[in-house]
Amino acid sequence: MSRKIKLLWDFRGPDAKETAKHHTIHLKEFATLENLSFYEISIQEKNEMLFSAFITVDEKDMKTYRNDLKPHRGEIA
């Protein structure tokens, strides 16, 4: 069974939530254009000034996402 990897992009400041939400649109577009599968695309709040956009993918697809989209960090989901 393949591991799931969560790739994250962090956004800070008073507009962080809206910026993270907007970033999820681009994540969905990329996955569709590249015909790549994913489990979830969403945002998470660390505090009112720090939000992250994330995508959860299979480990086998992680390098494609990582190399093309340059996430700030990743973790095992």
Image (spheres, grey):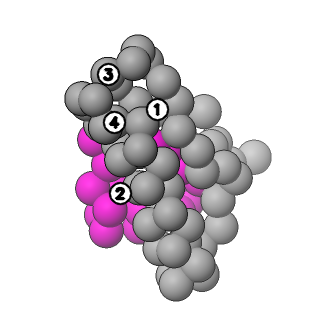
Q: Position of residue 57 (x, y in %)?
A: 59, 53
Label annotation for residue 75:
1
Task: Residue 66: say if magenta.
Answer: yes
Label 3: which secondary element: loop
Label 1: which secondary element: strand
Q: Residue at x 28, y 29 (%)?
A: 14
Mark yes or no: residue 10 visible. no
Circles 2 and 3, Cβ within 8 Å, touching? The answer is no
Q: Which marked residue is nearer to the observer: mark 2 or mark 3?
A: 3
Q: Amino acid at mark 1?
A: Glu
Circles 2 and 1, Cβ within 8 Å, touching? The answer is no
Q: Which residues are magenta?
A: 53-73
List the single residue furthest toward the top.
47
Label 4: which secondary element: helix
Q: Which marked residue is nearer to the observer: mark 1 or mark 4?
A: 4
How packed mark 2 is, by other alpha carbons closer than 10 Å (few <14, some 14-19, many 20 or more), is some
Q: Which marked residue is nearer to the observer: mark 1 or mark 3?
A: 3
Circles 2 and 4, Cβ within 8 Å, touching? The answer is no
Task: Say which residue label 2 marks.
Answer: 66
Q: Which marked residue is nearer to the observer: mark 2 or mark 4?
A: 4
Label annotation for residue 36:
none
Task: Say which residue label 3 marks.
Answer: 49
